[in-house]
Amino acid sequence: MDADEIDWAWQEMHLHVRLRDSDGDAFETLFQDIGKALWGTAFYSTIPMGSRGDLKCDGWRSDVGHVYQCYGPRYGQADVRDALKKVEEDFRGAKDHWKDLLKKWWFVVGLYRDKVPSEVARLMAELTNELKVPSGVLHRGDIVDLARGIEAGLRAKMFGGRAPGSGDMNRRATYENIGRALAYIRSDISRLPLEPILLPTAVDAKVAFNLLPDSVRHFFGISTAAARRVEKYIDDRADPDEGARMAAGFTSRYQQLRSEGAEPTEAFKQLLIFAGGATGDPDREVAALAIVTHFFSTCQIFDQPPEVGHDPA
């Protein structure tokens, strides 16, 4: 993997978190920022003006004649009646205002698990036939895919900067930062360089068995030494039962993710977030990565391949 692929794997996690936590105007603004960064002067972020409002358009792409309308309900939970009303009014309104300029209408949605109610999908299909204008849905996942095409330097400024390297793990994964990250986990549980890096044999086999991508393998590789500090911190600083409670908390979170249908890469991202990652704080993020690596190598999370013994990091 090259440097940009590693950086994108890190930035992608940050963008997923921002999309999950954004609703209403914040969701609309985030999509507009991505559109402007990706399509440049061909994309216009629109605002309401006067009695004519925003012409039923949150974004206009002039090179292809596409109108984008955003819908970001709180917590990603769609109210079907509201969603149907919005599609009906905004799709028809866009056709009325933009007429033959409108070549495609996009419904940009921030919905839980990228699921659109079937009634909304049916209405869009009906309006497409009636108005003779193609339509489509852009989910959170689709927005992430679009963001991948933004120029690397600009993308780094927008979504979490550069991925940590071995030097960051050695410098930032201190006892103090590990302690801060573990405190984050305690509160959550109480509420419930780029060349290949050798991994311990059992860990390498476990990465392959769980079909984790090269980017995750890279992150485990650079944080192997830091994971030992996590183990030592727990042994030295925590009360005798706290390590077991944290391991149980990670196991429970992983099992919940699996029961919800999370694929391995998504589970890895969510466990980093669970450990306090994706905050924009480099110290906390490298500590979170070290913690996840520790619990991965001690077999508390992800599936263990058959006939592979524990080979601690």
Image (spheres, rainbow, N blue to C red):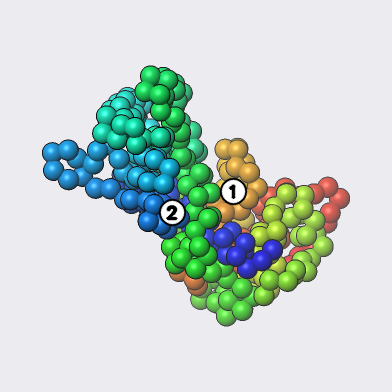
Q: Position of residue 125 (x, y in %)?
A: 44, 23
Q: Is residue 97 visible?
A: yes
Horizontal side, residue 312 vs residue 120: left or right: right
Dividing the picture into quarters, in which one does residue 217 lie?
Answer: bottom right
Classify the position of the C terminus by image quarter.
Answer: bottom right
User: In terms of depth relative to the viewer, which is nearer, 264 or 287?
Assistant: 264
Q: Which residue is mark 1?
A: 266
Horizontal side, residue 238 vs residue 205: left or right: left
- Under mark 2, the amino acid is Trp
Answer yes or no: do the residues labelled 2 and 1 have beta carbons within 8 Å?
no
Dividing the picture into quarters, in which one does residue 50 lie?
Answer: top left
Q: Position of residue 46 (x, y in %)?
A: 28, 48
Q: Is residue 119 visible?
A: no
Any mark on residue 39, and which? 2
- Under mark 1, the amino acid is Glu
- Seen at 40% across and 28% down, the residue is 133
How many labels sit on residues? Answer: 2
- Seen at 46% across and 39% down, the residue is 138
